[in-house]
Amino acid sequence: MVAQQANNTTVQQENPDNVNENGDQEALQSWLQGKMSGLLGESAVKLSQGEYEAARQVLGDQYAEYYGKYVDVAGETQGETADALNETRQTQSRYASLLEQYEKTYERYQEAKANGNQSGARRLARKLLSLSNQINSAGGNLTRSYNRVGNTTNTNVSQSVHQVQNITENVTTRGRAVVRAEFESTTLSVTGTRSGSYRDPLQVTGQLRARNHSLPETVTLAVGDHTERVSLTQNGSFTLTYRPVGVRVGEQNLTVRYLPRDTALFLGSNTTTRAEITQTVPTLTVESARTEASYKTVVPVRGRVTVDGGGVPGVPVRLTIDGMSFGVVRTNESGVYATTITIPAGVSVNASAIAATIAYSDRAIASASARTSVSIVETPTMLSVETDVHDGQVVVSGRLTANGTAVDGMSVAIVENGTAVATATTQNGRFSTTIPHEGTESMRVRVVFSGAGTNLADASAVASVQFPTREAGGTPVELIGLVGVLAVAVLGGVGVWYRQQADTVDSAEAADGVADAVVETSDPAAASRSGVEGLRGLDETDGVVVAYGRVRRALTPFLSVDEPGRTHWEFAHTVHSELDGEVVEAVEVVTRAYERVTYAETALDEGERAAVDAAVSEVVAWIEQETFDGEPRSDVSNE
C-alpha cells in the first residue's frame, strides 16, 4: 500500500531502499514516511476485521526496517516525526494484543453463560470490564498518536483514526452490556474529616449500599496503602482503622475503595475524604551476618522497623556502604526486611559500616537510620600480561582477577620506560590495547593496576617485547645465546617477571603472564627461531623466567596445542606426551626452576643454575636436530 498525501499525490523516489546514495533526501524521507503510514493503515484495517495477529505482523520486521532507514536519513532534524512513527507502532501493537485478549475472554464468558456457570461467568465478566477499560485508554492514546503522525508528516490518517474509534466504541458497548447482565452497582460514602498517624490511627467511618440486593456481612475495603476486611451493619455502615505509612504528612485526600470478590454480584466503588496526617518516628534496626567482608563476599543483612514494639509493614529501607547504594527492600507484615549484599570492588577498605535508612521524606512514617559494623578488607589481585606485535603496533593484553574471579570495569595503565603511554579497562577481567613502537629493538612493558579507592590490592606485571631478527641459515640464535647469558644472569640474582600483591598465586593465572609463550604459525621452524630471538640482551632481572618463556615459545610450534592461559605444568605435560629424547627432561628442569623463582621467590643455588644452563643447551640441540637447517620434521603435526 502506498500512502496518499494530504494533496492526494503519491511520493515517488528512485531506488528508495538505497539510503546511502546521494539524492533528494527530503523526497526519500517522505517516501519512507509514506511506507510506514501505509503499514499503520494496513494494520488498522486488520484490526477492524478482527485479525489481531496479522495486525501485529504488519508492524513487524518490514516496518522496523523502514523506520531504521528513516532514522538514518532524517537524523535529528526529524526527531519528532520519528518519535511519532515509533510511538504509534508500539501503541497499535499493544492495542491489538488487548483486543485479542478481550475477544478470547469474551468467548470464554459466553461459554460459561451457556453452561450455567454463574460464578465463572462473573469472574470472566470482571476481567472483561478491566480489559475494556484498558482498551478504552489505549484507543485514546492511539488516536492521539495517529494525529501526531498526520501533523508531522502531512499524511491523511483520518481513516485509521475512524477505524480505531469504531473498534473502541464497539468494545465499550459490549462491556456495558456485560456489566448490566452480571453486576449490581454499589455506592460508597465516608462521613467527616479525620486526623491521625501510625501511632494514633484514623477511624474511617462510612456506609456501603446496594440498590436491590443485600451486601455480604464482611467486605474488603482499601484506604491509601492499606487493605482490610471489615464488618457491615444491617444498613451497610462500617468503621475502618487506618494506620498511614507512606502517605504524605499534612492535609491529604484519601481514597477509600470497595473491592468485591471476582465472583461477587456487586461492582466496586470508591470515594475520597480529607484527612490530616501527622508523623510517627519509628525504630529501625540493622544487623549483618558478617563483621568482615572483601571483594565478591555475599553479606546477609536483615533488620526491622517498629513503632512501640510492633512491626510496621511496607516500609522501604535503603542499604548503603560507604555511600554506595545497594537498593531498597520493603518490610513484610511483621516489619522485617532481609536481603543480601555482594561487595563490589568500588567499596573502599576505609568503609566500616552497613547503613540502613528508611527511604521516606515527609511521610507518615518518618525517616530513620541505623548502622552495623563491617570491616572491608583488601583482596589480593593477580595481573597477567601478554604482548604481540602487529604492523608496527605492540598489542598488550592480559587479565585482572581477585580471589579467582574476573574483575570488571577497572583501569590499568601501560607503562613504557617509566611513562604511562596508554590505559585500558577490563571487561570480564580482560583488557587489550595497542601502543606504537618505532624500530626493532626489544622493549619492556609494565602494566599497573592501582587499587586506590577500592578494596583491591595494587598489582603489576612486566612483559618483554621481542621484534623479529634473523641470521642466515635459520639457526635459532637466541636460544643458543641464552646458554651463555643464563649463567651470568642468574649469578646476579633472580628477577621475578611476574609480580603481584597476593600471598598465594594460582598457577593457571601465572601461565597467562608468560609473554610470547604461544606462537601461531604454519611454519614450525620459523616459529622456533622467532621464539628465541633477542636473548643476547638479557639483563640480571630477566634470567630464568625469561629463559622459560623463550624455551616455551621455541618448542610451541612442535606441539599440537599450547594456548594462552595453560599453566607451566600443562605445557610440560604436553611436551612429555608429544616429544621425545632429552628435550623432555630439559623442559622439566627449566619448568621447575621457573616455578621456584616465580612462585616461591627464592634464588637458585650454583648447582641448580648450572642444571638450567645445561637444560637450555639440550633444548637448543634438539631444535637444531629437528629443524634440519630450517625445515621442520616431516613426522611432526601442528594441526
Image (spheres, helix red, strand yellow):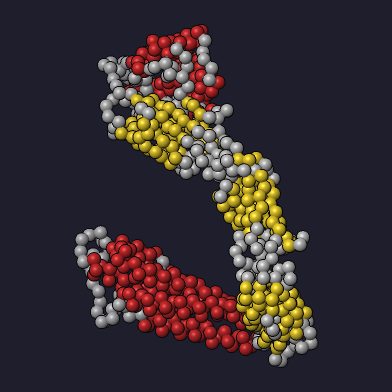
Quadrant of the drawing holding the C terminus: top left
Asked if residue 282 shows in the view, the reply is yes
Query: Residue 165: x, y in percent?
Result: 45, 83
Seen at 25% across and 77% down, the residue is: 10
Q: Nearer the viewer, residue 34 or 576?
A: 34
Q: Name the residue furthest left.
A: 23
Q: Residue at x 33, y 80 (%)?
A: 156
Q: Which residue is drawn at 73% across and 81% down?
A: 205
Question: In the image shown, does 230 or 536 lie closer to the viewer?
Answer: 230
| Count of numbered tags | 0
> Does residue 59 appear to the left or right of 504 in the view shown?
left
**Residue 227: quadrant of the picture:** bottom right
Q: Quadrant of the image for the N terminus? A: bottom left
The percent position of residue 512, horizontal first and vertical second, equals: 47, 30
Q: Residue at 47% across / 36% down in the picture?
A: 450
Q: In this view, does 388 lie above or below 141?
A: above
Displayed quadrant of residue 465: top left
| Side (left or right) of 415 relative to 384 | left
The front one of 419 and 523 is: 419
Where residue 462 appears, x then y in whole percent?
43, 27
Is 619 drawn above or below residue 273 in the view shown? above
* Res 592 seen here: no
Residue 488: % across, % down: 41, 10
Indicate left or right for 197 with 586 as reference: right
Of residue 348 and residue 505, the one placed in the foreground of this image is 348
Above or below: residue 411 compared with residue 2: above
